[in-house]
Image (cartoon, helix red, strand yellow):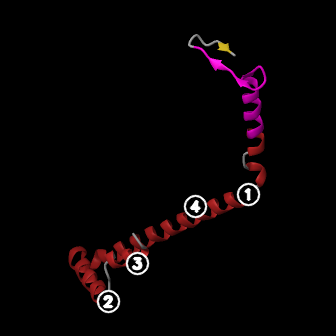
Amino acid sequence: MPIASYALLMPQIGPMEIVVVAVVALIVFGPQRLPEIARTLGRTLNEFRRQAADIRAEFESGIGDMSISDEPDYNANVALEAQADASLEVDGDNPATVEEDGGTSG
């Protein structure tokens, strides 16, 4: 689904909707508890942002620490595969066949 289609699925929240949510929250929680709830929500969001930033920084530093030597050596793997193929050959160019009993024949 294209990104533009997601924008159509998201609800549009304007100033009137925010006022309605605030009035409903005031009625449900009351004027005494509403500031406490707002503070708790603000602290929770702040802690979430801080944790997300820490995770992002740790991930980026891990990517930055990665060097070419950390990547697998594909040339060594190719050489090992060539050695394994060569060890299976019998009589030079004829590949070995494996019989049911596990033996090889040429």
Quadrant of the image for the N terminus?
bottom left
Quadrant of res 72: top right
Callout 3 secondary element: helix
Dot 4 surroundings within 10 Å: few (below 14), some, or many (20 or more)? few
Foreground: 26 or 20? 20
Q: Are marks 4 and 2 in contact (CB under 8 Å)?
A: no
| Marker disc for residue 15 | 2
| Marker disc for residue 4 | 3
Q: Residue at x 25, y 74 (%)?
A: 29
Foreground: 77 or 8? 77
Q: What amino acid is at disc 1?
A: Asp
The residue furthest top is 101
Q: Is residue 21 visible?
A: yes
Residue under label 4, please give it: 55
Foreground: 45 or 86? 86
Task: Point out the frontmost of discs 1 and 2.
Answer: 1
Q: Is residue 95 shown in magenta?
A: yes
The mark nearer the N terminus, 4 or 1, is: 4
The mark nearer the N terminus, 4 or 2, is: 2
Magenta stretch, residue numbers: 78-99
How far apart, in angstroms, are the residues tagged by discs 4 and 3?
A: 29 Å
Q: Residue at x 21, y 79 (%)?
A: 27
Q: Is residue 73 visible?
A: no
How far apart, in angstroms, are the residues tagged by discs 2 and 3?
A: 23 Å
How far apart, in angstroms, are the residues tagged by discs 1 and 3?
A: 36 Å
Q: Is residue 94 above or below residue 5?
A: above
Q: Are marks 2 and 3 in contact (CB under 8 Å)?
A: no
Q: Is residue 10 above or below residue 94?
A: below
Task: Point out the frontmost of discs 1 and 3.
Answer: 3
Quadrant of res 83: top right
